[in-house]
Image (spheres, grey):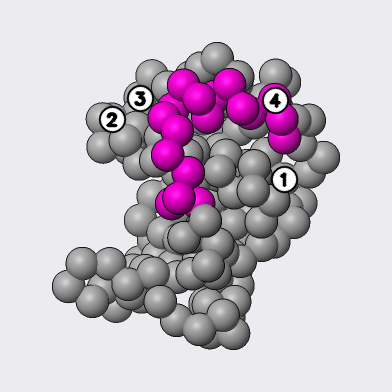
Amino acid sequence: MADQESTAHDTETLATLVAGEALQPNASPALRWLADALAEAEMRTLTSADLARIDAYVGGAKELHQLLPAVLPLPRAVWYATSITAQHGTAIDMGYVAVPADGGIDVGYVALSRAHRSLIGPIGPVRVTATSMTRPVAMDDGAWREVRSATGIIIRALLIGV
């Protein structure tokens, strides 16, 4: 993983790229929603130490849902961003957002492949409450897996206060 200064720069670039892409006429509703959420969000960068703390939590999805009320109500949207090196050395900037919503949070996710300068996703919004997640009707299985994983990261980050 990149050092914290580099990570902060890269993740700010991701937020800026999302905002710019959302202005395009062909921008998806998910991209526009994410850009709107980012405009109001508190920006946080996840360091390698933060990611290790998030990964250390061993509870499953049911336990995470049950713990969600511990961080509600969310006073404002939160954007978590980080840079990772994926398989085969691929550099990826990842962004996760939690937006206050009735009974829980709305979550979203986007990634940037630095090598291709292309966005992966975005996915969202998906409503998360203490008892469930509401899968959008048109969401395919791959996107659903990604947003469920992103939701785990978001809830863990909120719980540990990063």
Prevailing secondary structure of the magenta residues: helix
Q: Which circle, 3 or 1, is nearer the viewer?
A: 1
Which circle's residue, 4 or 1, is located before the other in the chain? Answer: 4
| Residue 140 disc label | 2
Q: CA distance from mark 2 to mark 1?
A: 25 Å
Label 2–label 3 contact, CB within 8 A? yes
Q: Does the image show residue 18?
A: no
Q: Which circle, 4 or 2, is nearer the viewer?
A: 4
Residue 151 appears left or right of 145: right
Which circle's residue, 4 or 3, is located before the other in the chain? Answer: 4
Q: For numbered disc 1, what is the local secondary structure?
A: loop
Residue 147 appears left or right of 131: left
Q: Kindly identify the amino acid type of the residue bearing the numbered disc 1.
A: Ala
In the image, residue 107 sits, relative to residue 113, either above or below, namely above
Q: Does the image show residue 112?
A: yes
Crowd rating for badge 4 (residues with CA inside 10 Å; few <14, some 14–19, many 20+): some
Crowd rating for badge 2 (residues with CA inside 10 Å; few <14, some 14–19, many 20+): few
Residue drawn at x 82%, y 40% as measured from the top left = 75
Which circle's residue, 2 or 1, is located before the other in the chain? Answer: 1
Which circle's residue, 4 or 2, is located before the other in the chain? Answer: 4
- The residue segment tinted magenta is 54-71
* Residue 70 magenta-highlighted: yes
Residue at mark 3:
138
Q: CA distance from mark 4 to mark 1?
A: 16 Å
Q: For numbered disc 3, what is the local secondary structure?
A: loop
* Residue 156 magenta-highlighted: no
Residue at mark 1:
77
